[in-house]
Image (tube, rainbow, N blue to C red):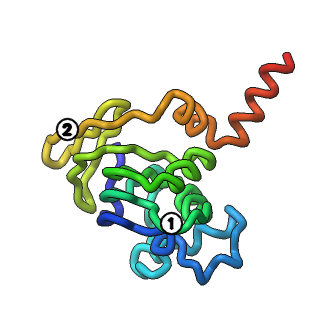
Amino acid sequence: MATVVLKAGDDVSTDVIYPGRFMATVLPSETPQYAFADNREFNFRLKANQISAGSIIVGGMNFGCGSSREQAVSTLKGYDLVIVAKSFARIFMQNGVNLGLQMVVCPDIEASEGDDLELASLEVLNKKNGKRFRVLPMSESRQAIIDAQGLIPFTRKRLLESSR
């Protein structure tokens, strides 16, 4: 079970998640400090370690739209956040898979900041109101990459297994 720490609407762009003015900083170890930089309260809470790993951001439709910058994913991954959204922009979804970001596609999700959600492979349970929402599971191959923490660790593991 994890707590919703931010409720975002529809069409949250990569520029909202990781503003373009910080594009000179691209190292995954440095990008997290700029997560939602224009939402000063949320950004402060992240940087002050007031948000636990595994906490949830709930998004609407088309989460991560806009540019193809993978820093929008690495900034969220750096805090080990889980994104539950009605849908994800195509490029953000693939960047998320490649970097091992925990993402849940839940088309009918209803949750507010402070709600506790229980995530399962086929549903999300909002513990506050008792409502259950179906999940659209990732493909087996995408989930395997996410479970391995990203494409590079996944590939490394596969290469090691095949060399035995």
Image check: 149 left or right of 40? Answer: right
Up-down: is 30 above or below 110? Answer: below
Amino acid, disc 2:
Arg
Residue 129 spot, x, y in % from top left: 13, 47
Q: Which residue is mark 2?
A: 132
Which quarter of the image is occupied by the C terminus? top right
Separation (CA) of disc 1 from disc 2: 30 Å
Q: Which residue is mark 1?
A: 49
Q: Residue 163 falls in which quadrant of the image?
A: top right
Amino acid, disc 1:
Asn
Residue drawn at 45 percent across, 81 percent down:
38
The answer to whether one can see residue 68 in this image is yes
Residue 28 spot, x, y in % from top left: 68, 62
State the SS at label 1: loop
Up-down: is 103 above or below 30? Answer: above
State the SS at label 2: strand
